Image (cartoon, rainbow, N blue to C red):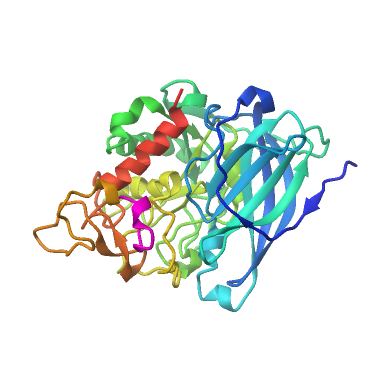
Amino acid sequence: MKKIILIFILSFVTLPVFAQVNFDDYFTAGTLRFDYIRAGNSASNDIFFEQLKKEPFWSGNPKNLLDKFDYGHYRYFVYDSASNKLIFSKGYDTYFNEWQSTSEAKVVKRSFYETVIFPFPKKTVKLELQERNKKGVFENKFEIFINPGDKFINQDMPRKFETNKILNSGDPLYKVDIVFIPEGYTKEEMEKFRKDAERFAGYFIECSPYKENKEKINIWTVEAISDESGVDNPGLNSWKNTIMNFSFYSQDVERYLMSLDVKSIRDLASLVPYDNICIISNSDKYGGGAIYNYYTSFPADDKNGNSPYLIVHEFGHHFACLGDEYYTSQVSVEDYYSLTVEPYEANLTTLVNFDKKWKSMIDEGIPIPTPATDEYIGKLGVFEGGGYVAKGVYRPMFDCTMKSRSYNNFCPVCKKAIVEMINYYSEK
């Protein structure tokens, strides 16, 4: 058995300065998935290797292998081991990071399944996982050297399901590839899922700025079948045998519809080329959730008519790392944003380092902070309230799809962040 060398280190890391690399020099077809367990509590966490898995497709842009955004509580670097050259990087968030800010995390320790993916390497690479500390500075948490020829890299294919492409704009390497996966749909309900997926694709591409960039987007479906219809609802003592184990009352918030079964989610998504994962749950109850570079979740049939809003709001988190701008709704997290650190989300600021946010976009004469008066409603400014708190965190406009249940209402700052991410995936 070949040795897998694990190195645990704790050091401060600054964002490197780099130029993009040539894909063909270091990578070949397919994806290498690194699965691991993150376990801990509110104060600390440790990482434990789980498995390596080869997936058949890589749909990321071969020109943009190095992440130019400073988004996410976590990030990972892939180095060519021979030269120590950085050849891939990406930022991300996880369910664990949110859970760390809950009251439960102060009294118990828990473990969470997590994954990161990158193009399948030609030669041995070093994978490095990093985490922001309380000051917003990245620290190295874990390293592993991976030999792509290791016979223990799992190449099992998940259970085969029918796949389709409901928006075909071209080569996955130069498009934003989104996969819709059904949760809680039985075999007899697949026709319903097909109609639901078409409907949500419509909501998505009719919303600005996706509408203007439709030709840069592919939407796929994987017709994954569940044994039972619906999703778990602990509040009603209702439990369903479904393929990805989604549940309302995640983190004890009724509307939060999430799953810890990341392994199953990734396995199903790997049946098509994908960059972003959307889970459509067979439910008419309001809810959903999303985490940056993790997945997006929403119910199929919100009985109050919020479905168009839900998909674009939640996808804003997952795709462009947009933060929640509301501050009056129930959430599970406590003190999620430090008022002494600038949030990494593009649409939130604590004014600690506002120069790197949307300051240059604000018209001359608009006061900072901006009063929520009739004079400034509808104008780009700096309005107090956001990130789940009424004081100390600021948002770009009085209202936005990231603040209220309003469809096709992204502010200029959110639109800019979304377009930049679309272009990152689709640039030729």
| Magenta span main SS | loop
Q: Which residue occupies the foreground of this view, 123 or 238?
A: 123
Tell me if residue 350 is in the magenta stretch: yes
Q: Is residue 347 visible?
A: no
- The percent position of residue 132, horizontal first and vertical second, equals 56, 59
Q: Nearer the viewer, residue 104 or 119?
A: 119
Bounds of the magenta segment: 348-358
Q: Most extreme residue toward the left, as rendered?
A: 375
Above or below: residue 320 compared with residue 47 = above
User: Which residue: 46% across, 32% down?
Assistant: 425
Number of marks: 0
- Position of 45 with respect to 407 (left or right) is right
Q: Is residue 398 above or below residue 254?
A: above
Residue 340: percent from left, percent from top: 43, 68
Residue in the picture at 34% in, 50% down = 313
Q: Which of the 4 image quadrants contains residue 371?
A: bottom left
Q: Is residue 161 left or right of residue 425?
A: right
